[in-house]
Amino acid sequence: MADRQEAGYLRVAQAIRERIADGTWPAGHKLPNRPALAEEFGVGENTARQAVEIVLAEGLLESFRGRGRGTYVRAPRERHLLPRTLTAGGAAPGRLGLAPAGSPTSLESESTAKVPAPAAIAARLGIEAGGLCVRTDYEVLADRRCVLTATSWEPYALTSGTPVVLPEGGPLAGRGVAERMAHIGITVARVTEVPRPVQLDRETAQLLGAAAGAQGVLIERTHYDSGGRPVETADIVVPAERWDITYDFPLDPVVRA
């Protein structure tokens, strides 16, 4: 029974995709309500709802409340490049290393000291779960629209009592992890990044102007010192439907022998 139900909502979701792809349901078309969809495809209303939620999460549909409420076929959105650049010293333009190509950006941030690290963050930093950190939340804005969000964590024990304890405060405000750590005698030697596909939760989606459940790219970034110790880790979230993240790696020229 469970297998048949699963096959049912996948079948309905595929039918919705096909109608959008072949133009049967053009951009702006309002979908039938759930009872009507269920009756048309011979499934229960819960199955119809699951199918619509799948296609909503893929960014092909959008839902509205209030006047004009309902689910509509979303118009294709123009995609833009989001270059990812790191210098040899680990510094990153805009501190996060991501900014829309050709667009002026601004950065909003808020730092909080002595925040207990969640277990997953503590594991990435090599500290005990609940260990105190400085947490900084970022929003990168372009044309007054939030392009991406990031949450950075630094062990409080590393920077406590120094001028760089707050990433966006003090004499080196906004200078980037490598430069700030160098100021207190810590050499950042490498950065690792792990991109992962994610579904945007409701709060993040609203901030990024996307539908709840839409696809995003999560970049787990960690800075390490010369001894291999993690000194900072961050989760950077980008809405996948709008941005193509491009990586630019400078290479040393090869001289022909």
Image (cartoon, rainbow, N blue to C red):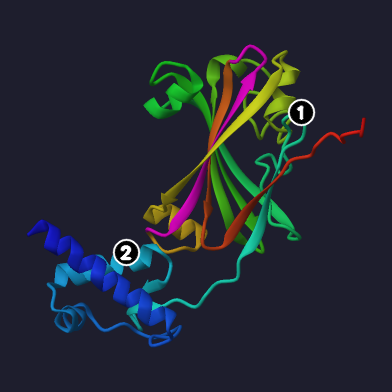
Residue at (75%, 19%) from the top-left corner?
Answer: 183
Q: Is residue 252 above or below residue 40?
A: above
Give the mark, 2 or 1, whose residue is nearer the N terminus: 2
- State left or right for residue 149 relative to residue 180: left
Q: Is residue 239 above or below residue 15?
A: above
- Residue 131 picture quarter: top left
Q: Quadrant of the N terminus?
A: bottom left
The residue under label 1 is which amino acid type? Answer: Gly
From the top left corner, tell me how far across and down residue 72 is, in percent. Answer: 38, 79
Image position of 102 (left or right of 145) = right
Residue hosting label 1:
89
- As drawn, the residue found furthest toward the front would be 257
Q: Is residue 177 above or below residue 57?
A: above
Q: From the top left corner, tell me how far across and down residue 163 is, in percent.
A: 69, 21
Residue 160 x, y percent position in the rendering: 59, 16
Q: Which residue is mark 2?
A: 54
Going by the image, does 104 lie left or right of 71? right
Q: Which residues are magenta?
A: 213-228
Instruction: Answer few, some or many: residues within 10 Å of disc 2's Cα (few below 14, many 20 plus, some between 14 and 19).
Output: some
